[in-house]
Amino acid sequence: MHFQCIVVEFKTMNCWIRHAHSEDLPAIVAIYNASIAGRQATADTEPVTVAARTPWFSDHCPNRRPLLVAEDERGIAGWLSLRSFYGRPAYHATVELGYYVAPDRQRRGIGRLLLTEAVARAPGCSIRTLLAFVFAHNAPSVRLLTAFDFTPWGRLPAVAELDGREYDVLIMGRRLSLEPPQ
């Protein structure tokens, strides 16, 4: 299956979505690492390395488990990953998604663009269920997922500890039809 790169204009900048290439991994890691200090988007507490993320990157495949990047005139602005859930065959049609936007490009519609593209591509990858594990205090992500028809499917109370404080994690989900939209 072949997907075209889409180009969308957002607030005076051009932004396009494409599948990630190996040369994008340093930018992907940098965006991820930039989110650690904010204690809203990841349970990692220390930066990760490109080498440590290489196996994760290799687990993605455009036709089955896409890793998408949003690119603008300055480079990679954000990314979204659809990765296998729980590693058991019965979950083959379920993925966990994660998305991150560069700090200087947040609140410009890039996360929305990435989610729009992921939801559109998922049925072509035989994906029927999208899951997102998000800190309950991450109001921007909860709002964005809700806008994309994700609903809370569960709450894991006080499962994450960051800087001596405990945080809840929401499990948000959305079921998709494998039928193409008409």
Image (cartoon, grey):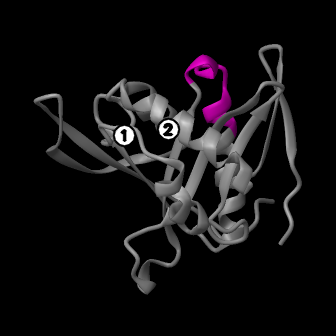
Q: Quadrant of residue 104?
A: top right
**Range drawn in magenta:** 103-113
- x%, y% of residue 10? 78, 22
Do tag 1 and tag 2 residues touch (Cβ < 8 Å)? yes
Q: Nearer the viewer, residue 177 or 72?
A: 72
Q: Is residue 21 magenta?
A: no
Residue 104's disc number:
none
- x%, y% of residue 50? 54, 50
Q: Earlier in the sequence, mark 1 or mark 2?
A: 2
Q: Main secondary structure of the magenta part?
A: helix
- x%, y% of residue 26? 62, 43
Q: Quadrant of the N terminus?
A: bottom right
Q: Is residue 90 above or below residue 12?
A: below
User: Residue at horizontal 59%, vertical 27%?
Assistant: 102
The residue sitting at the top extreme is 12
On screen, residue 92 versus residue 121, left or right, reads left
Amino acid at circle 2: Tyr
- Identify residue for label 2: 32
Q: Is residue 108 magenta?
A: yes
User: Residue at horizontal 65%, vertical 52%?
Assistant: 118
On screen, residue 35 versus residue 112, left or right, reads left
Q: Nearer the viewer, residue 161 or 47?
A: 47
- Identify residue for label 1: 42
Q: Is residue 70 above or below residue 138?
A: below
Q: Nearer the viewer, residue 57 or 146?
A: 57
User: Residue at horizontal 28%, vertical 35%?
Assistant: 136
Q: How many marks?
A: 2
Alpha carbon of mark 1 to alpha carbon of mark 2: how far? 8 Å
- x%, y% of residue 19? 75, 54
User: Residue at horizontal 85%, vertical 60%?
Assistant: 3
